[in-house]
Image (spheres, rainbow, N blue to C red):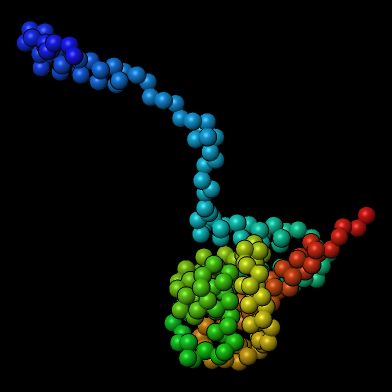
Amino acid sequence: PPPPRSAEEQPSGRAVAGSRRRRTMASASEPEAAPSASVLEAPPPEKRQTKAEQNEAADAFSDRLNSTPAACSEAEAFRTADDTFKGVSDAAISALCSVSAEALPAGALVVMECWCLLHGEPPSVSKCQELAKDPGDFRLVGMSSMQCLSAEEFATIVERTSGLDVKELEASQTPAKEALVLMLPWLFAASKLHQWAQEARAKPEED
């Protein structure tokens, strides 16, 4: 082994510290490694639409449908039901907030629960009443709302509303009936038009 260094030959603590500082400074002055191509090329995360944006899209879709001629009776029926419902007053919608579920006819409960599905909410009377606190938002439904439903949700609306009668709601004494008697025809018409559109898309195009 080499002979041990004398005290003069051994580096002083100051020299060692200086050497460390120089190495540290050199490392700090080196440019950072560029990100890999995979990072640069990674697509940005998909931006989720806010509820307001979804509602605006639904309303815009309804406006386009209402201004476009159609060759099917389902589209005409939907235009009529949509125009009528969109004209319902804020007070009529707000009346839904104050009614007791026990005082409502069975058909009204179904309508209110189905309306929650259009807004992407779990179906319940209490949730519908919560939605009705904002009448403007409550009205913002359209055919795009139907298109956003899952197959199971759409089947639920069709099945649960199929046996309902608007006359039952009209005969009820609930203060919320003004809105309910317009909501049910809207559900009928939107469901039929959605079914028609699905069947039309499924048919092979004619030459």
- Please give left or right for residue 50 compared with residue 161 in the image: left
Residue ID at (61%, 60%): 58
Q: Position of residue 145 (x, y in %)?
A: 62, 65
In the rendered view, would you say 62 is above or below 152? above
Res. 26 image quadrant:
top left
Farthest residue to the front: give it: 1
Closer to the camera, 113 or 3? 3
Farthest residue to the left: give it: 7
Farthest residue to the right: give it: 207
Res. 144 image quadrant:
bottom right
Query: Residue 55: in sight, yes or no?
Result: yes
Residue ID at (8%, 9%): 6
Closer to the camera, 83 or 77? 77
Q: Position of residue 125 (x, y in %)?
A: 49, 80
- Please give left or right for residue 197 compared with residue 3 in the image: right
Name the quarter where the C terminus is drawn. bottom right
- Please give left or right for residue 105 compared with residue 185 in the image: left
Q: Position of residue 149 (x, y in %)?
A: 62, 67
User: Exactly how many numbered labels are in the figure?
Assistant: 0
Closer to the camera, 108 or 3? 3
- Please give left or right for residue 82 compared with residue 203 in the image: left
Query: Residue 89: in sight, yes or no?
Result: no
Q: Position of residue 166 (x, y in %)?
A: 65, 85
Residue ID at (52%, 34%): 38
Name the quarter where the N terminus is drawn. top left
Farthest residue to the top: give it: 8
In the rendered view, would you say 9 is above or below 177? above
Residue ID at (63%, 90%): 168
